[in-house]
Image (spheres, rainbow, N blue to C red):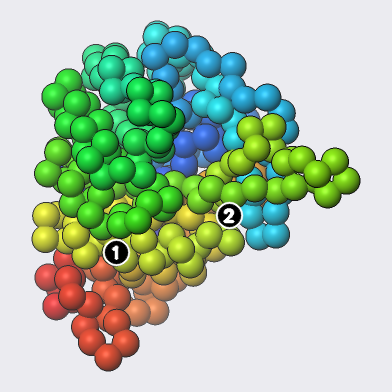
Amino acid sequence: MKSEEKGMLSSEFCGMRFDTPLVLLSGCVGFGEEYTRIEGFSNRDVGAVCLKGTTGTARPGNAPHRVYETPKGMLNAIGLQNPGVDHVVDKILPQLDFDETRFIANVSGSTIEEYIKVTERFEDSAIDAIEINISCPNVKEGGVAFGNDPEMSARVVEACRKVTSKPLITKLSPNQTDIADNARRCISAGSDAFAVINTLMGMAIDIESRTPIIGNNQGGLSGPAIKPVALLKVHQVHQVCCDHGVPIIGQGGVTTAEDAIEFLIAGASAVGVGTALFYDPLVCNKINEGIVDYLKRHELSSVAQLSGTLSLNGAVSACDSNPENR
């Protein structure tokens, strides 16, 4: 790709330079090194890599089956298998090449105290930013996911904000009543950005045994099947974010350049790629090339000029964060 074309893809996200608008999603690329073993793959082809969800201590994860393919999607219930934050910071981060791309930690926990512990540990590391996974169950509140309650979401963000100066990206769940209200409260609590959306909850059943196929009974649904839901949620959150200058990573079912462009138009500043990597590890190159082609055809010089340009049928979008397109 020519230097001019690379310039069209680059942008700023929470003070970080992203060489492309693409972000490899947490849980899909291990701790940043797994796909580098594939010929033709490079972390330099994306703006950032989100590391696997990390907790205070090591977790073995859920019992199998953990993954199940569905029409146009995939169910997973890995159970946050990870070696714990000390191992990640001491052993894994030093092996990453921070000249390749930006690396974002994913903080997970069962209590607010655990979120604080993990965030504090990453604060003193080389990590570029921190993504807060608020879809974890709160063990002190009967297992209700933090992300499904706006008040609990804000409490987690506020607690993490107090112990880090790094950019905080809150990963919002679609499994809640009002995602826009949740975003509004998280901004007040100190969130610098959002990742929209996390997986939808789903189930698959073995009709012969009449039992759930996933060992955890239910799992997170990702892949192309959830893209229409994700697009709507990005649009709804963008209506809250645009007045505050809070950027969004739009994600959920992105497999082509057209998918990525839809998310940008809906209000995302960057676009997450996850499940598509499982069957096409080199898909990011194709998406980057498609975005550049679109920008050229529409006489746009940057991804930023495209972000948030959605015009609703019968009206102009209530909030357009891009002054060049007002």
Look at the picture and state if 62 lies above or below 296: above
Mark 2 highlights which residue? 223
Residue situated furthest front in the rendering:
142
Q: Amino acid at mark 2?
A: Gly
* Position in image of residue 52 (x %, y %): 48, 29
Most foreground residue, 17 or 24: 24
Label 1 sits on a secondary structure element that is helix
- Is the C-beta separation of discs 1 and 2 under 8 Å? no
Does residue 1 appear to the left or right of 301 in the view shown?
Answer: right
Percent position (x, y) of residue 145? 40, 36
Most extreme residue toward the bottom, as rendered? Answer: 314
Q: Secondary structure at mark 2?
A: loop
Is 206 left, or right, of 319 in this rendering? Answer: right
Q: Is residue 234 above or below residue 106?
A: below
Residue 67, percent from left and from top = 68, 39
Residue 101 visible here: no
Q: Amino acid at mark 1?
A: Gln
Numbered label attached to residue 236? 1
On screen, residue 202 above or below 209: below
Ranked by sequence position, the earlier of labels 1 and 2 is 2
Callout 1 crowding tier (Cα within 10 Å): few <14, some 14–19, many ≥20: some
Residue 29 visible to the viewer: yes
